[in-house]
Image (spheres, coloured by chain):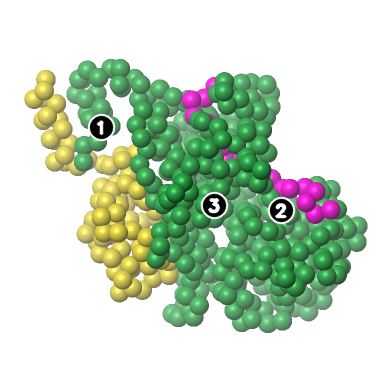
Chain colours: A green, B yellow
Amino acid sequence: MATRRTFLKLAGAAGLAAPSLASAQGAGRVVVVGGGFGGAIAARTLKQLDPKLSVTLVEPNPIYTACPFSNSVLANLREISQQQFRYDGIKGAGVTVAETSATAVDAAARTVTLADGTKLSWDRLVLSPGIDFDWGAIPGYDEAAAQKMPHAWKAGAQTVLLRQQLQDMKDGGLVVMSSPPNPFRCPPGPYERASLIAYWLSIWKPKSKLLLLDSKDTFSKQRLFQNGWDQLYPGMIEWVPLSKGGKVTSVDPATLTLVTEFGSHKADVANVIPPQKAGVIAAKAGVADRTGWCPVEPVAFESTLQRGIHVLGDAAIMGAMPKSAFAANAQAKVCAAAIVELLAGRAPQQPLLINTCYSLLAADYGISIAGVYRPDKGLLAEVPGAGGVSALSAVGGLRGQEALYASSWFRTVTAETFG
Amino acid sequence: MGRLLLSVLALALLSGGPAQAADAPPGASSCTGCHAPMKVTDSVIPRIAGRKVADIVTFMREYRSGAWPSSVMGRIAKGFDDQQTEAIAAWFGAQPE
């Protein structure tokens, strides 16, 4: 089908006159803040869709450490280096990478200020800052405490620290995890982590136990996880829901104690996954609301609080779409296409988005949840009748197949983003 | 000039040409998270770029009905009607293999 864009390209190729439209099409400066699964592919896709755009990716870390599959690092199934990616591919695609952090955003002047004082002007700003922790939400849990009781919810040094603590633990020790209230990054993540720690413990320290204290009464893929725990690690994982006193009300890092409404638990290894909010630049830019997260419209993911600023991934309130790397990737590609249209003065299309999240319960045991999403009443809503979780009864090696699909997805999405 | 333009457009319509990513129909950009546009080593997920359009449509219909068993594709295919599925299939079919 010959769209207007095709027409313009052909007109240009044939030497036909459409100069004002053609030059208007190529204009535009987009700044993307945050080089994770949302921001990195947003920057790359923008440049791919319209090579004339000036695209700058602001990201302080020269090496990105991916969260998906970082639970496998804890279980010694992977090395942390297999989680790490550089930005060379993105630079090679024509994106300017500013290796620093964004410190301020002026929505009215359409500028972003970098840590070195530089101001970048933008026609459209994309914020994909991921999460930050709500330090202070659990009394006793601060950045210093995280060195004793790692969160490991941003992959990297924290992941390696938690793995080291597990390896140093005596057989027969007690691992205590705490899972945060909704919403938070990677809803099935704490339960995959409990599974893979149990997988590793069952091989190397089989007398040990894992206590999972939860601020919720239900969780993602719950029956699949609990059935798997009974089958693979009988008696090893104890899940304590909110209604049975699972909510952690304070911690003491000196004694590795987690206090709940119903009592206290002294851990040999403690993994506290604290409550979360959008990455700090979101609040500075005025795109986070009182919940700490960022409301956006469901077509181009433009902030409903500040015009011209788009928010992607974990930081955004995406309706029914969960906070996952797959979702951030899907949103970023939709957002990039929408921005190209908006800069050219056209209306973006009504999108459809997919999410698929795999979790591992063992090296060769995978489960998934999927959904298809569309704009509905100002939010992304699930397309009825689609999506759902893996079959409860696995036939024909289904769990092994899904474990293979999980690693294949990771290879694909990281190749698409960073390759 | 008008005639030249028309012939250029007609040529484009006839030849199809490689689809531009910006013209991707709704849903298509999500697919590449798993079905990579490039060759990926050690992936068991099949590439669909450059496949026969009719084959992609058939697979999606059979995933949707359950006639062809699947892990996740049945759950995803149910989110797309015939028209949306055909548009996505046509777009992937026009991508370089």
**Camera-side mark, 3 or 1:** 1
| B28 relative position to A146: left or right | left
Q: Chain for mark 3?
A: A
Place of residue A224 in the rendered image (x, y in percent of width and height, measured from the top left)? 56, 74
User: Residue at (62%, 32%) from the top-left corner?
Assistant: A285
Circle on res. A4: 1
Circle on res. A275: 2
User: Residue at (72%, 81%) from the top-left corner?
Assistant: A235
Amino acid, disc 3: Ala
Residues at marks 2 and 3, common chain? yes
Amino acid, disc 1: Arg
Crowd rating for badge 2 (residues with CA inside 10 Å; few <14, some 14–19, many 20+) = many
First in sequence: mark 2 vs mark 1: 1
| A149 relative position to A124: left or right | right
Amino acid, disc 2: Pro
Q: Chain for mark 1?
A: A
Q: CA distance from mark 3 to mark 1?
A: 33 Å
- Residue A197: tell me if it is visible: no
Q: Secondary structure at mark 2?
A: loop
Place of residue A385 in the rendered image (x, y in percent of width and height, measured from the top left)? 39, 66
**Camera-side mark, 2 or 3:** 2
Q: Which residues are magenta?
A: A121-139
On whether residue B30 falls in the magenta region, the answer is no
User: Residue at (62%, 40%) from the top-left corner?
Assistant: A288
Residue where numbered disc 3 is placed: A325
User: Residue at (68%, 54%) from the top-left corner?
Assistant: A153
